[in-house]
Image (tube, rainbow, N blue to C red):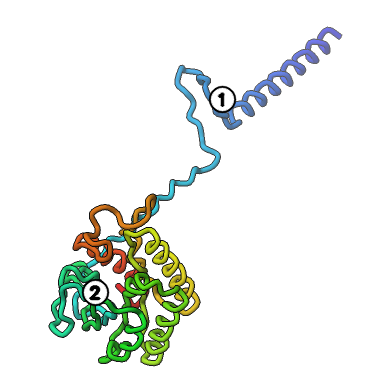
Amino acid sequence: MGSAAAWGWRALAVIAAVIILLALSLAIAAPRTAAPSGLTAPGGQPEPTVATESIPAPVIEADEAEPVFIPLEQRPVARFLGDSITRGMTEPSSGVVGEHSWFYGLIDDTEGVVRYGGSVAENGMSTAWMAGQVWTALYPTPDILIVHGGTNDVSGEITPPVVVDNLERIRVAAVSAGVPLAVCTVPPRADPAADARALAVNDAIRAWASANDVIVLDTAAPLRDPVLGGWLPGYTTDGLHPTPEAAALMSEAAAKALRAIPLGV
């Protein structure tokens, strides 16, 4: 009995040893887990943490492209129809545009976007006169016809519907000739009553142009005082005509609009 008991205890000891060895083997083979954030792993070194999801990089929007130089021969040919603001100090037949013409910068050699194809413009003329001269302005056929009128209509208290009717006659002729039409907004006026009429004409022009696929060049916007109305200080000397500085702003506004359409830059 004593011998048999001894052998039984020895067998139990061997089994226990085997179980302990198996437990140690499993513990060694098991993957280690990272220490919780903010804790220190054995050895005094912080455990590395693994990100569970990536953070998208911020999206950086590109700035608007700067106007690029367009060689003169690649620009669309523009004919201009208007009154004294278009004529400026220029004799239309001479081919030389004076700095008081609102489109002086629009045909500039370096920053311009159109090529000068001539103008039909006279001092003191209304949009009715321009409608009567449209076929002269459309010959020879340009790539675009640009009209700046309405100042004298406002002076004569001609109503917005009459101005729009005159512009519609111009549009019909341009469509017949296959020429895109661009119409400028009317500049501010020093007299509050006249300025109110100018604003009404501009509203009518925008509505008509939107309904008839006509390009609007908002050349009046940079000249207008947004708080007091009328001209911004220093942009006119007589309440009617822009100074050369104001004319440059009108050209910039027109160039920006023309660059935004396929016909432009």
Q: Is residue 44 above or below residue 157?
A: above
Q: Is residue 68 above or below residue 5?
A: below
Between the residue at mark 2 and the residue at mark 1, the CA separation in whole angstroms equals 81 Å
| Residue 230, quarter of the rendered image | bottom left
The x, y position of residue 20, in whole percent, is: 68, 20
In this rendering, the count of numbered labels is 2
Mark 1 neighbour density, 10 Å: few (under 14) some (14–19) many (20 or more):
few
Which residue, given by chain and number where applicable, does mark 1 sit on?
Answer: 36
Q: Is residue 143 left or right of residue 164?
A: left
Per the rendering, the mark at residue 47 is none
The x, y position of residue 17, in whole percent, is: 69, 19
The x, y position of residue 143, in whole percent, is: 30, 84
Which residue, given by chain and number where applicable, does mark 2 sit on?
Answer: 84
The quadrant in which the C terminus is found is: bottom left
Q: Earlier in the sequence, mark 2 or mark 1?
A: 1
| Residue 160, quarter of the rendered image | bottom left
Q: Give the residue type that dot 2 points to.
A: Ser
Q: Describe the element under mark 2 as helix, strand or loop.
A: helix
Q: Give the residue type that dot 1 points to.
A: Pro
